[in-house]
Image: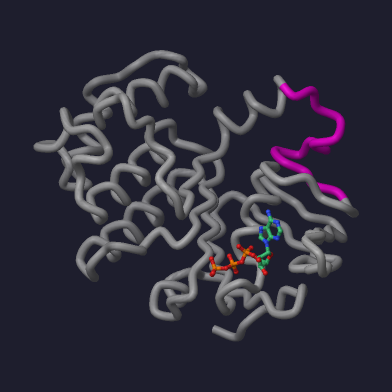
Amino acid sequence: MEICKLQNVSKSYMMGEKVSPLQNINLVVNTGDFISIEGSSGIGKSTLLYVMGSLLKIDEGKLYLDNKDVNSLTDQQLTNLRAEKIGFIFQENNLIQALTLQENLEFAQALGKKRITDSQEIVTLMERLGLLERKDYLPNQLSGGQRRRAMIARALINHPSLILADEPTNDLDDFWANEIVQLFVEAINKGCAVVIVTHNNKWAAEATVQYRLKYGKLALLDK
Ligand SMILES: Nc1ncnc2c1ncn2[C@@H]1O[C@H](COP(=O)(O)OP(=O)(O)OP(=O)(O)O)[C@@H](O)[C@H]1O
């Protein structure tokens, strides 16, 4: 099942000089896909992920999420679609600073498909991510790696159809990075699709489909 499609998508920034990180990009993400996108720093990987999640407006082309042309959706419909179907893992901390880790996850659940909080599910996920003993901590009281895992928990808690993860293994040692990849694989086996952006070849190679972004174009890498 197709969850995200980019059709001839281009995106530029104008800040004095024009930068065009995405030029005529075509990409289809289906349920069950595990896709990695590699590329050097500043090449446009985050831009691509933001575009895929419809968090950045594109200049040209079409974006389809859950088989819907995002241009045909109202802001509210798009907000609901993102909250219900997409789990974002940003490079920057997107946890709510005034809420504890547990409250952050409850808040995320309240915005999700079911719009109910399920404490058992939160406990199970926190346990898996080694965070249970930190459930009452505020985000800024967590270590960098714990905070990264907390951001991943927030993205996974609502069982999204699509996970868009920007450098998800940053701040993590090999043990936890491997655990995160395993969690992604389990989510994929339950019907999710995962797209990770990374400059780490080791974790990129865990994906079943690998792309490299270079000079505005996506190239498929041989496995
Ligand atoms: N809001 C913005 N306004 C102007 N230029 C931007 C903006 N966001 C990104 N850029 C530029 O677009 C290019 C791509 O940035 P992007 O963050 O997508 O790269 P990246 O591959 O994710 O980099 P990194 O691996 O370092 O995180 C960079 O040259 C950056 O300076």
Which quadrant, please, contains the C terminus? bottom right
Residue 131 is one of the magenta-drawn residues: no
Q: How is the image coloured?
A: one colour
Q: Is residue 170 above or below residue 143?
A: below
Q: Is residue 2 above or below residue 109?
A: below
Residue sitting at the far right: 60
At a point 76% along the width and 39% down the height, the residue shown is 67
The image shows a total of numbered marks equal to 0
- Judging depth in this view, the residue of 17 and 84 nearest the camera is 17
At a point 79% along the width and 36% down the height, the residue shown is 70
Left or right, 163 with reference to 123? right
At a point 84% along the width and 60% down the height, the residue shown is 10
At a point 59% along the width and 77% down the height, the residue shown is 39
Q: Position of residue 69 (x, y in %)?
A: 83, 38
Q: Position of residue 33 (x, y in %)?
A: 56, 58
Q: Position of residue 68 (x, y in %)?
A: 79, 35
- Judging depth in this view, the residue of 145 and 212 nearest the camera is 145
Q: Is residue 58 above or below residue 26?
A: above
Q: Position of residue 58 (x, y in %)?
A: 81, 50
Residue 68 is one of the magenta-drawn residues: yes
Q: Indicate the quadrant of ligand 1 in the picture.
A: bottom right
Q: Quadrant of residue 29?
A: bottom right
- Judging depth in this view, the residue of 103 and 34 nearest the camera is 103
Residue sitting at the far left: 133
Q: Is residue 47 above or below residue 130?
A: below
For the record, the magenta segment spans 62-75
